[in-house]
Image: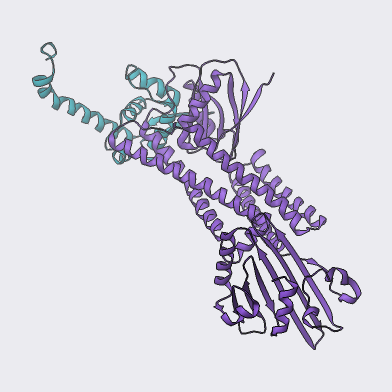
Chain colours: A cyan, B purple
Amino acid sequence: MKVAREQFQTLSEPMYYILLALTEPCCGVDIMKKVQEISHDRVSVGPGTLYALLAKFESSQMIYEIDINGRKRTYLLTPKGRETLKEEHDRLARMVEEGKPMMRQNILPEEEK
Amino acid sequence: MKDKLIRYAPFQLYESTSFEEYLAEMSLKGWLIEKISANDLLGFMTFRKVEARKKIFCVDIFSLASDSNNRPRGQTADYVELCKAAGWEFLCKRGKMLVFFSEDENAVPIQTDEELKLHTISKETWKRIGTVFLYAFMFSFLALSRFSRSTFEYSVVRYSGLFLTMAIAFIAIINLILLFDFSIWKIGMQADRKAGRSIRYRVDHIEVRTAIRSVFIAGALISLSITIVSMYFETNLPFSTGIKASILGLVLIGFTAVYYFIRKISKSAGQIYFIACGILLSLGIIAMVTFGSSFGSSYTYFGSEGIKEVSAATHNTLPLTLKDLGITGEGTHESTAEINQTFLASSKEYSEQYYVENTSYYYMSYTIFSTPFDWVFDKFIAEQQKTYFASPDNQLSSVWGAKSVNIDSRGDTTSYYLIVYRDKILELQVGFALSSEQIAVIREKLNL
């Protein structure tokens, strides 16, 4: 899992939401708020985790710094970051799509089918 | 009313959860941490009096924080700002360990990714544990070597030697305990990961572990202090040399303190300063060891200008002189004496040389070692036999009336004897062949 994360072949939940937030220019505080907004408060990213992940994303050239204002740094996705996010989004969507028939058949209750 | 409180703080990086719990308990009692000193073994933390209220704490490990700077700067300051925006107030830091608190019980934790948190703690502890391992190995080796070969005598007959050995042993034990403790945590942590359980950070028996560390650290510091004081009394260190050594020590401490307390220097300048401090401290340690060795082997000189003229009285305090062995004349006599005693053993060491310029030279030195402890007695003989006295001589044993005699002539004019009696051991070096009459005189004079 660790290796996969390092190579960003699959993204962890916080990674995915941080990249989603960075489809628009955001600083650290904005990212934390946006992640909660996007996930309807289901996912929270702590500042420590965020700082470490931003550093990883930046060193892998998935995000870049577009502005520094005092201690406030604003980031945005790079083309590579957008590509990774899109791949992950598609992978997740595909997984949901591929799972639907079996879910309908065996798991979901009648009214949800 | 007291508004400051100082407590010992030996918390390690992998004990951050214990530390958080401890700080939460203190805040319920109305004490909030405001400062923590740099060293994780010798460090103290300062609390200030606040209104007793429930607070949550986060002891966070930030890899990019400077090891030496206790105020957040650069990236650490950015990080602290980010945490503040998330509802966490920065309190203080020790190296890479940052302490935050929040009054909002629902504040999002600083670390929300367990894997990342674990990775950081593990990585930073490994760096620290490398030094611990080095110290554990080095000091264990040093402690063991204090009980071998020629250092054994020094270690048991002088309080400076005895307490230095104890200090070294304490330092070795402290580091071995840390190494053991971290290994236990690491093994437990790996087992938790394999089993898919949430990781346990060390919270168990923290009071016991802290107490054990405190005892050994106090032991090491007390032993070192006694060593220094004993060294002063044992060596008749001239006052001026003491003053010079103290000034040198103060300069070294001051130089290092400037780095730790002023810190208004750039990062690169800080690194150069840090290296310079390291070099200076190393030189200081080398100087101390060198001086220490020379202090250890210093003698009380009874005079070197001929016994007739200067120091006949003191010279006569030697239990055995060359004169007793029939070596007399108008040449120059020089003699030394050094007597050391601890509760473990005593050693009386004397030497004398007599020479007439360009014509004759006689030399004799003898040490009488005794101890009430059998293991010290046997160990001393074993180590001395290993070092110098290879061949036992049964014939000489009866001449000396001793349990055993080992002799080593080394191919030169000096003979080295190790003569073991029931309750004492005589080490003798003579630069001339001993007759049986002279041996009888030695036995009589030294009560052997």
Q: Using the image as rendered, state which of residue B249 and residue B232 is in the foreground.
A: B232
Q: Position of residue B248 (x, y in %)?
A: 74, 52
| Residue ID at (55%, 79%) | B391
Relative vertical location of residue B193 with respect to residue B225 in this rendering, above or below: above
Q: Position of residue B301 (x, y in %)?
A: 80, 68
Residue furthest out toward the bottom: B359
Could you tell whether A13 is left or right of B54 in the image?
left
Could you tell whether B239 is left or right of B106 in the image?
right
**Quarter that holds the N terminus of chain B:** top right
Relative vertical location of residue B241 with respect to residue B369 in this rendering, above or below: above
Could one spot residue B112 in this view of the protein? Answer: yes
- Dividing the picture into quadrants, the one containing residue B162 is bottom right
| Residue ID at (47%, 30%) | B18
- Dividing the picture into quadrants, the one containing residue A106 is top left
Q: Position of residue B364 (x, y in %)?
A: 73, 77
| Residue ID at (82%, 85%) | B357
Q: Position of residue B423 (x, y in %)?
A: 64, 65
Could you tell whether B375 is left or right of B114 in the image?
right
Relative vertical location of residue B309 with respect to residue B154 in this rendering, above or below: below
Q: Using the image as rendered, state which of residue B6 and residue B93 is in the foreground.
A: B6
Residue furthest out toward the top: A111
Could you tell whether B348 is left or right of B190 in the image?
right
**Quarter that holds the C terminus of chain B:** bottom right
- Dividing the picture into quadrants, the one containing residue A7 is top left
